Amino acid sequence: MEVCHIHGKCILSPIRSSSSSSSSSHRPLSVLSRVSISARSNPRLLSSFRSVRRKNLCSACRFDTLVAGKDEKPKHGEVVSKKEEEFGDLKSWMHKNGLPPCKVVLKERPSHDEKHRSIHYVAASEDLQVGDVAFSVPNSLVVTLERVLGNETIAELLTTNKLSELACLALYLMYEKKQGKKSFWFPYIRELDRQRGRGQLAVESPLLWSEAELAYLTGSPTRDEVLERAEGIKREYNELDTVWFMAGSLFQQYPYDIPTEAFTFEIFKQAFVAVQSCVVHLQKVSLARRFALVPLGPPLLGYRSNCKAMLTAVDGAVELVVDRPYKAGESIVVWCGPQPNSKLLLNYGFVDEDNRYDRLVIEAALNTEDPQYQDKRMVAQRNGKLSVQVFHVYVGKEKEAVLDMLPYLRLGYVSDPSEMQSVISSQGPICPVSPCMERAVLDQLVDYFITRLAAYPTSLDEDESLLADSNLNPRKRVATQLIKLEKKMLNACQQAAVDLIDQLPDHTVSPCPTPYAPLLK
């Protein structure tokens, strides 16, 4: 697989060593700010840059993953190891550049899509015991904003006011990729291209799915989250030129390569998703080092929700200490953090059916049309709640979530001024005020869960039938896994509310009418 397709003849400026900051990266911040402001506010200056760039810049690489051509399966008889023989595999390259002896090897498994090459993963090279150090990657082989921007102050400014860390890292790797084999990071970028931003199930993030494929998520809030994240990436793309001007290291290395002209939005989005799938969040380090790209880290490492092992910053390196025994050849896994399955799918392209951190979100809001809205808002705040309150429903704890919502909903149903005064003068959460109000609150919850379940186009039984099909499209499979788990949580919530209705002392009581019921979404 060619890493970059260059059309025509051109000479790319050799990039300076990432570990050494350029002189401009040490200029006072105010100087860099003036450069940025003057360029953005002076159309003639920006036009001049672009004009020179058009004359000197060769065609941008064609991208399908990080910044690469299609990662198609080699044709029959095609030699695919020439490049790897020339440059060595990722691990060999790392050893040549400072990786000490370690206890892992790179193995490969077939992709779910037979059109794509197999993907690599990290496995134990020998039997490992709990507490063994699997590997320790020196900082010289770790990509962070400190390395990218050459100045921690600039890194903090950019990521605070303009771009996310992921966008900065993606931009850096895109520029590095343009150098092809001249780049120090060529073996690592080649490996990222091979992975194609795929998770353990060889599925790309829904951010790269087609509109028809996003329909697999109909009924799930995740679909809207995908669209919202895509809009956020677009906004970051529109700020790339600011980063280019403010980051002295990139500015000197590519003085005429204006990002939004060198890379299309689709290219940037693919690079962003690839970085998103493998970035590591390091603890107890400076802001400029907290997000890191670690060769031998994800996606070569598998994620597991019930794992405790994490990549950790130590003196001069990032190391992995295993939390469980491994036999030689077994795939090594790490903890992905307390993320629900919706985030695992969005960030890494997989769903964990044993994820104890899985959760749904229910938003409740006091009715602003209620004449007693301000008093109710005060009572809610006194009990640690907001006028628009988000409730989390954790898997296996659906009944507890319903019980947690009841006091807030009861407050919304109080309509009599004397009852409201009694609520204001009392302390603690709102207890049941009357049988008819309690029935009304529980009925609203049941109706809400029924409505959410009705938004899915399939039933749980239909989901199970789909998942039993071994030939099911991989993207549809992970989407179906997600919505199946969401439905199970919603069903459990509905059942909890029905059980509470059954426990009411008098089932003949009709729900109290209320003109200002709280809103659920």
Image: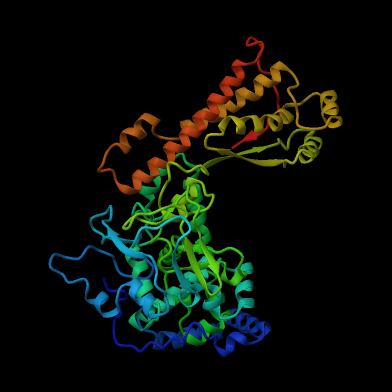
Is 60 placed above or below 471 here?
below
How is the rendered protein coloured?
Answer: rainbow
For the point 29% across and 79% down, the residue is 87
Query: Measured from the top left, where is residue 65 in percent x and y?
Result: 36, 65
For the point 76% across and 21% down, the residue is 433
**Residue 76 occupies quadrant:** bottom left
Closest to the observer: 218 or 20? Answer: 20
**Residue 493 occupies quadrant:** top right
Q: Residue furthest left?
A: 77
Residue 315 can be seen, yes or no: yes
Q: The N terminus appears in which quarter of the rendering?
A: bottom left
Is 140 placed above or below 472 here?
below
Residue 459 can be seen, yes or no: no
For the point 12% across and 68% down, the residue is 77
Q: The C terminus appears in which quarter of the rendering?
A: top right
Closest to the observer: 442 or 288? Answer: 288
Query: Measured from the top left, where is residue 477 in percent x and y?
Result: 34, 44
Closest to the observer: 208 or 166? Answer: 166
For the point 26% across and 62% down, the residue is 117
Is 447 placed above or below 10 here?
above
- Is 54 on the left-hand or right-hand side of 194? right
